[in-house]
Amino acid sequence: MPETGPLTRSMDKQFEKLFAMMAEMKAGQEGLERKMEAGQEEMRVAQAGLEQKMEAGQAGLEQKMEAGQERLEQEMRSGQEEIKSQIQAHTESQVEEMKTHVDGCIGKIEEEVQCVKLKIENVESEVQRKIEESNCEVQEKIGNLERRISELEERPNYFPASQLVASLRGSAAEVLQGIPADKLTELTTVEKALESRFGDSHLTQFYRTELKTRRQKPGESLQELAADVERLMSLAYAEFPLDVRESLAAQYFVDAIRDEDTQHSTRLMDAKDLKSSLAYSMKYEAARTVSKTSRHVRSMGTDDHTSRERDDKFEFFNRLEKLLNSSVSGRKNTPRRNPNVTCWKCNKKGHVQRECQAITSNQEN
């Protein structure tokens, strides 16, 4: 064998050390692998134990959560019951307070209703007294009227029928041809024949019906209404005395007034003639108009201007009343004539025989 040198021997030694180190490393690696396997096994065991602990902790946590949820639900139910009881108690107290307040209001309303009833009873008694007084006065006036009519019917007629027959001319004289000769001396028979030929007695009932049903028209003033009532009175009751016609005209005028307040107020005033009823009703309407105007103006805060305007209105209505009084007085002094009356002398309408101008001119000639 060839002789090796010192280099070779040193290298062999190094290789031996290297192989020894490699063997040690291999042995250490195997030990490390064994340790790693053992550590992994321990880790698997620890993980399994941890999973078991986690499962056990989760189950306990779920139990605790369920118990806490039940406890919370119980607390919520008890709180709800307590709140309900508090709300019910508060509601009951509020209801009791409302009942007390309502009972008090009802008591006050009942007291006010009793006061109003008492006032209404007083007003009704006063109105009833006025109505009874008016009825008594109306019955008295009707009795006087019937008595006057009876007196007029029983009054003897001193006008000679022969004078009337001799004064008739034209168509009036022709009426006498239908009367028997023995009846020409009876004034009543001659008058009835002339009335049936020339009179307007058939219209009297029509005028009376129109007078009873007369009502104030929209836009018609009280003066116009009074003038028309006076015209119908002269046509319907021309044969009645003047005082009786005035009393009846006042009653028909009040019945025809359209406004109920004005009508009732004028009726309670119980005027004796048409002039007084008209004057009072105009004053009443004027006062109402001024009252409404003054209330409207006061609401705008112009008291001074309203006072002056009210004074001007009162002065205007006073002048109007004076003018009305003078107009009514002039109409009363003017003799009333039935426009449909016919003269038996000249057969012309508008006057009677004793006022006929033809007779006057013949007498002068």
Image (spheres, rainbow, N blue to C red):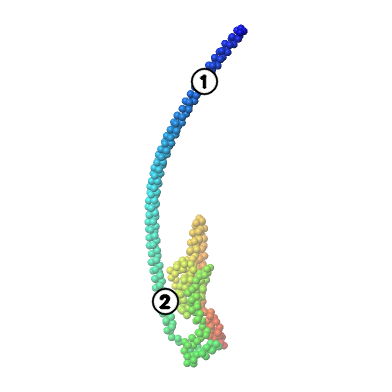
**Residue occupying image coordinates x 43% and y 68%:** 268
Residue 351 vertical placement versus 257 (above, below): below
| Numbered tag placed on residue 142 in the rendering | 2
Q: Nearer the viewer, residue 337 or 39?
A: 39
Residue 8 at x, y percent in the picture? 60, 9
Q: Amino acid at mark 2?
A: Ile
Q: Amino acid at mark 1?
A: Glu
**Picture quarter containing residue 114?**
bottom left
Q: Which quadrant of the rendered structure holds the N terminus?
A: top right
Q: Residues within 10 Å of mark 2 (few under 14, many from 20)?
A: some
**Residue occupying image coordinates x 48% and y 73%:** 213
Q: Nearer the viewer, mark 2 or mark 1?
A: 1
The kind of secondary structure element at disc 2 is helix
Residue 180 at x, y percent in the picture? 49, 91
Q: Residues within 10 Å of mark 1 (few under 14, many from 20)?
A: few
| Numbered tag placed on residue 30 in the rendering | 1
Residue 246 vertical placement versus 99 (above, below): below
**Picture quarter containing residue 133?**
bottom left
Earlier sequence position, callout 2 versus callout 1: 1
Q: Nearer the viewer, residue 197 or 84?
A: 84
Whether residues under marks 2 and 1 lie with C-beta atoms below 8 angstroms apart, the answer is: no
Residue 209 at x, y percent in the picture? 48, 76
Q: Is residue 245 visible?
A: yes
- Alpha carbon distance from label 2 to label 1: 155 Å
Q: Residue furthest front?
A: 1
Q: Nearer the viewer, residue 30 or 89?
A: 30
**Residue occupying image coordinates x 50% and y 81%:** 202
| Numbered tag placed on residue 198 in the rendering | none
The kind of secondary structure element at disc 1 is helix
**Residue occupying image coordinates x 57% and y 11%:** 13
